Amino acid sequence: MSDAMLGKALLIRAVECDQNGRILEAQTLYQDGIAQLMSFVHSEPDEVKKKGFLTRIKEYIDRADAIKARVNGKMMLGEVVTHLSIEENDTGNDYDQIFGQYMTDETIEIMLEEPYLTQNYQFQNLIRFLELAVTNCKHLKYIRLITKKDANNLDQQKTNLGQIKADLERRQIAFYIKYEDTLHDRKIFLSNGYIIKIGRGLHFYKASNPMYSIGLTNYKYRKCLQTDVDIWRTNK
Amino acid sequence: MSDAMLGKALLIRAVECDQNGRILEAQTLYQDGIAQLMSFVHSEPDEVKKKGFLTRIKEYIDRADAIKARVNGKMMLGEVVTHLSIEENDTGNDYDQIFGQYMTDETIEIMLEEPYLTQNYQFQNLIRFLELAVTNCKHLKYIRLITKKDANNLDQQKTNLGQIKADLERRQIAFYIKYEDTLHDRKIFLSNGYIIKIGRGLHFYKASNPMYSIGLTNYKYRKCLQTDVDIWRTNK
């Protein structure tokens, strides 16, 4: 498919997602579609045609900006639903116990901001989170992961995340990975309006010690590190 | 404590367990108590006293034999509750889904015959089974594990099982390990009367492939190897 065709196809899907309330996926599609069209326009020799294209691209950029404002607005406004302090060595805090009840059939999109995904246990935590999402959110369509690049082994990180992306796509869930090297805060945004903020993100479990003991695989028995959990609900 | 004192203490606990229907633990305690008393009797120089002790030991041996017959009887008689054929690559078969419903508050003792416990994934499966037992059987007091010795690394196997034993004892669950090198069949006996026979024992899951994919930690998404499951209920 040419850049222009691909760009158009992406933008058509962007508008569809936008109309269906799937604003995170729409945002990604607008952005990708615009980039495709831009690279096509740059190679267009006819200045009149070029100007026409740029005018239409500008419209899509405006739509994308409007969505960005909506997404950011959703992140900021809202009411506190609950607060939980996890103390050092506490148990009874697997993901399901903390925020499983907010991951519902109405959650069709998820944005996960988790800066640290480089170690084996961190990828395991990501899978554990995704398993819960797949289990609880029956109509899940799109997940956006924002994380930092692994400075030491970027290839391995990309391989792992690529495998996860392929696996989710087999389940008809789009998985979009964005690298942001300045990311610090952790946040989980659910499209049904809930935002979960955990001080340590997904990684607040201690290692199983001794390895073979209750809590190795069932994290409700895992000892935790101290961290705070805040759960918000955005205004619809 | 002297051999004689320890032996007596074990036998008192054996009788208590026996009277409370905890026949697996009673069996272990009779056996250990008898062994302690025997080693004491052998060093008793007074032939008359020795004979008196042997007479009492004989009574305990008879009780232990009676329990053995009861345990074996329970294993053999019963009615089929359900049969399940797991096909190659099936999913939806974590331990809880297959037999979680039979592990209840009435399960105070468990006997697990699992010949193969040497590899990392096999110990993980054992922990996964024990986590389910601890979760579902609120009054669990005793687990007997029967397995084969690891011919290649017995020290590591003993270390791992020793750690599991210590971990369970912190939860007031006695864990008794018996090595039987001729063991082949797999069986789970629950003291509430259910027997679960799985052709491959605890080890019927395929490896996660690729490693980081849905099913890495939640085994209801894990692909299985072909195996049959038979569940029986013994006559009470």
Image: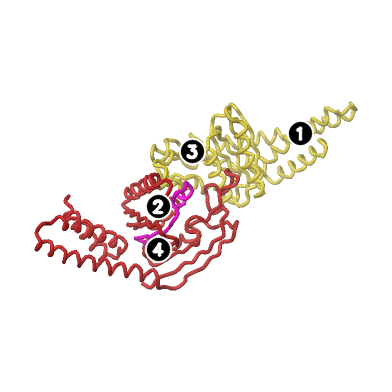
Chain colours: A yellow, B red
User: Is residue A101 left or right of A62 when viewed as pictured?
Assistant: left
Rendering coords of residue A110 (x, y %) = 60, 42
**Can you say whether B134 is above or below B79 in the image?**
above
Q: How far apart are labels 3 and 2 at the CA level?
A: 49 Å
User: Is residue A130 left or right of A89 when viewed as pictured?
Assistant: right
**Can you say whether A159 is above or below B44 in the image?**
above
Q: Residue at x 84, y 32 (%)?
A: A53
Q: Which numbered dot is residue A34?
A: 1
Highlighted magenta segment, given as a residue range: B107-125
Numbered disc 3: secondary structure: strand
In magenta segment, residue B12:
no
Q: Which residue is mark 3?
A: A230
Residue neighbourhood size for the residue with mark 2, other residues' Cα within 10 Å, grouped as few (<14), some (14–19), many (≥20): many
Q: Nearer the viewer, residue B39 or A87?
A: B39
Numbered disc 4: secondary structure: strand
Q: How far apart are labels 4 and 2 at the CA level?
A: 21 Å
Mark closer to the chain start, 1 or 3: 1
- Report the chain holding disc 2: B
In magenta segment, residue B113:
yes
Same chain for the residues under marks 4 and 1 in the image: no
Q: How far apart are labels 4 and 1 at the CA level?
A: 63 Å
Amino acid type, callout 1: Ile
- Report the chain holding disc 3: A
Within the image, what quadrant is residue B148 found in? bottom left
User: Is residue A229 left or right of B139 when viewed as pictured?
Assistant: right
Residue neighbourhood size for the residue with mark 3, other residues' Cα within 10 Å, grouped as few (<14), some (14–19), many (≥20): some
Same chain for the residues under marks 3 and 2 in the image: no
Rendering coords of residue A176 (x, y %) = 65, 39
Mark closer to the chain start, 4 or 2: 2
Residues at discs 1 and 3 in contact (Cβ within 8 Å): no
Q: How far apart are labels 1 and 3 at the CA level?
A: 36 Å
